[in-house]
Amino acid sequence: MVYVHNLSRVIIIIVFCNLQLIVTISPSIICNRIRGLSPKQKKICAESPDAFIALSNGHQLGALECQHQFKDNRWNCSEAWLKDIFGHFMVLGSKEAAFTYAIANAGVVYAIAAACSRGNISICGCDQYYRHQIAYQDKNFQPWKWGGCSVDIDFGIRFARKFLDAREIEADARSAMNLHNNQVGRKIVRKLLKKDCLCHGISGSCSLRTCWKTLPQFREIGDTLMMKYKKAKQVAAQNKDTGYNLVIRRSKIDKKPIMPKTLDLIYLEPSPTYCEKDIYLGSSGTHGRKCNRTSKGTDSCSMLCCGRGYITKLFHRTWQCNCKFIWEIMNVKCDICSERTEQYFCK
Ligand SMILES: *[C@@H]1O[C@H](CO)[C@@H](O)[C@H](O)[C@H]1NC(C)=O
Ligand SMILES: *[C@@H]1O[C@H](CO)[C@@H](O)[C@H](O)[C@H]1NC(C)=O
Ligand SMILES: *[C@@H]1O[C@H](CO)[C@@H](O)[C@H](O)[C@H]1NC(C)=O
C-alpha cells in the first residue's frame, strides 16, 4: 500500500533535487519504489517521469476538489485518498466510489494537459490541430482564427487512460464500473474546455482575433461531477460471453435493458449511512464532526450526527478594539471587546 505522504515525499525528492540527475540515472528505481503500482504503471512511470510528476499533482488536485465538494457530507472524502493512491482505493462499488474515480481521472487529465502547454513535459506540447490558418467568423461576423497554444487535451486523456485504466485487470463488474467512471471524469474535462481570445488590430480595434482552447477552473469540473454524482445511475451486471455489460437497474425485470449514457456516473451498490466507522465500507463515521445547528442541509446537526445528538462547546474570545490615539496622553487607548461563540460537535 502506498500512502499519499510517502508518495509525495518521493515526488518532492524528485522535484527538489536535480530533476535531470535523479531521473536520468534511475527513473525505474523510483518508480519501482512506489508501491501499489501495477507492472504496466511502473513502466509508464519509468518511461516518462516528468509526466508522472504531473500525474501525481493531478491526483492531488482531484483529492482536494473531492474534499471540497463533500466537506458538508457524512462521507467527506478524507479517507478515500489516504490509501493506495494509484491502486484500488475504495472497496464498495458505491456512488461515492464513482465520484472518486471520476474526479481522480479528471485531475490527472487536467494536470497533464496544463503541464504540456506550459512546456513542462518533454513528450507533449500544444495541440497542433488548432494551428491551421483558416479564418472563421463568429456570430457577429467578426473574424478570428486559431493561434497561440491550445491545450492538448487528447494527449492528457490518452495518458490518463493508459495509466489509470491499467489497474482494472479483474474483468469483473466492478472493473467495468470503474472503467466507465474513469472515462466520465476524462471526458468531462474535454467537454468543459473554453475558448480564450486575444484582439489584434490598430489600437484595440479587434479587427482580427486569435483564439485557443484553454482549461476551465478545476472547480467547474468538480461542480459538474457533483451534479452527475447526485444523478448517478445504479447499474447491474448482465453477464455476456463478451464480458460484462452494465445496464441501468429498473424495477420491472421484463423491460428492455437501458445502457447508461456515456457521461452518467454509475454505481453497483447502494451507499451505507456513513454514520459509524467501517473501514471496509470506506466510512470514518461522524462522531466528533463539527455540525451546523441552524443549517437545513447535509451539514445540519440532525443529518450529520445521525440522530445521536450533539454537544455544544463554548468559546470565549477577547481582543482590543476601537483603538484611538489620545493626544492628551500621547498614547493609544483601546476598549476590550469580547465574543462568545458556540460550536457544535456530533456525539
Ligand atoms: C514547470 O516549469 C516551470 C519552469 O519552466 C517550473 O518553474 C515549474 O515548477 C514546473 N512545474 C512543474 C509542475 O513541474
Ligand atoms: C472528515 O471526516 C473525518 C472523520 O469524521 C474528520 O476527521 C475530518 O475532520 C473531516 N474533514 C473535514 C474537512 O471536515
Ligand atoms: C450554518 O448554516 C447557516 C444556514 O445555512 C449559514 O448561514 C451559516 O453560515 C452556517 N454556519 C457555519 C458556521 O457554517
Image: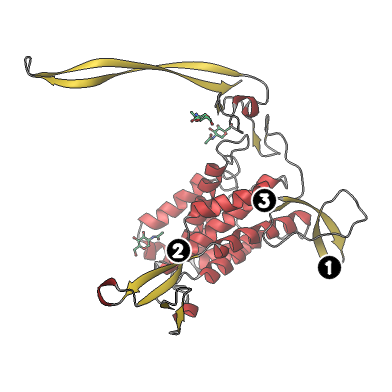
Q: Nearer the viewer, mark 1 or mark 3?
A: 3
Residue at left 21%, top 17%? 334
Q: Amino acid at mark 2?
A: Ala
Mark 2 Cα-neighbour bin, 10 Å: few <14, some 14–19, many ≥20: many
> Distance of mark 1 from mark 2, alpha carbons?
37 Å
**Do residues under tags 2 and 3 come within 8 Å of each other at their CB atoms?**
no
Residue at left 41%, top 53%? 13
Query: Of the residues under marks 2 and 3, which one precedes in the sequence?
Result: 3
In the displayed structure image, the side of residue 147 where residue 75 appears, left or right: right
Dot 2 lies on which element? helix
Residue 128: x and y in percent read 47, 79
What residue sits right under mark 2 in the picture? 114
What residue sits right under mark 1 in the picture? 242
Q: Amino acid at mark 1?
A: Thr
Q: Is residue 34 visible?
A: no
Queried on whether the Cβ of the residue with tag 1 lies below 8 angstroms from ligand 1, the answer reads no
Queried on whether the Cβ of the residue with tag 2 lies below 8 angstroms from ligand 1, the answer reads no
